Image: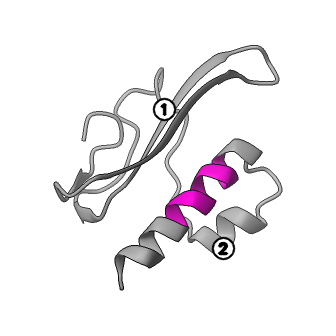
Amino acid sequence: MEEVRIEVYDDLQYVESKSFFTDKGDPVVDIVFLCKYKSGEPHCANEDEVAGVFWLTAQEIFEDVNTPIWVKQSLKIAEKMRLNRKT
């Protein structure tokens, strides 16, 4: 809710976290959770913190040449967890 103005259900599942520097030298702390959308219209609440909001399928992200590798790596783990959660 704080960054992109959407609400998710309370059953968050931790995926992973990591810290690194981007190619431009910017420090990043990336904390990834698997969650289910509940409500709200996504948009940037603070453009200093979030550059943009995009709704894409996992396949679209994997196929996008502009998506950073670290996003794809986290998504691969999250997708495996999501699929295992359904069974």
Q: Which residues are magenta?
A: 71-79
Residue drawn at 68 percent across, 54 percent down: 72
In depth, the one of 77 and 25 nearer the eye is: 77
The Cα–Cα distance between marks 1 and 2, rounded to whole angstroms, is 22 Å
Q: Secondary structure at mark 2?
A: helix
**Numbered-mark total:** 2
In depth, the one of 47 and 23 nearer the eye is: 23
Q: Quadrant of residue 56?
A: bottom right
The residue where tag 1 is placed is: 50
In depth, the one of 79 and 62 nearer the eye is: 79
Q: State yes or no: residue 25 in magenta.
A: no
The residue where tag 2 is placed is: 59
Q: Position of residue 78 (x, y in %)?
A: 51, 60
Vertical side of 45 occupied by 21: above or below: above
Q: Position of residue 71 (x, y in %)?
A: 64, 47
Asked whether residue 30 appears in the rendered view, the answer is: yes
Residue drawn at 38 percent across, 46 percent down: 43
Q: Secondary structure at mark 1?
A: loop
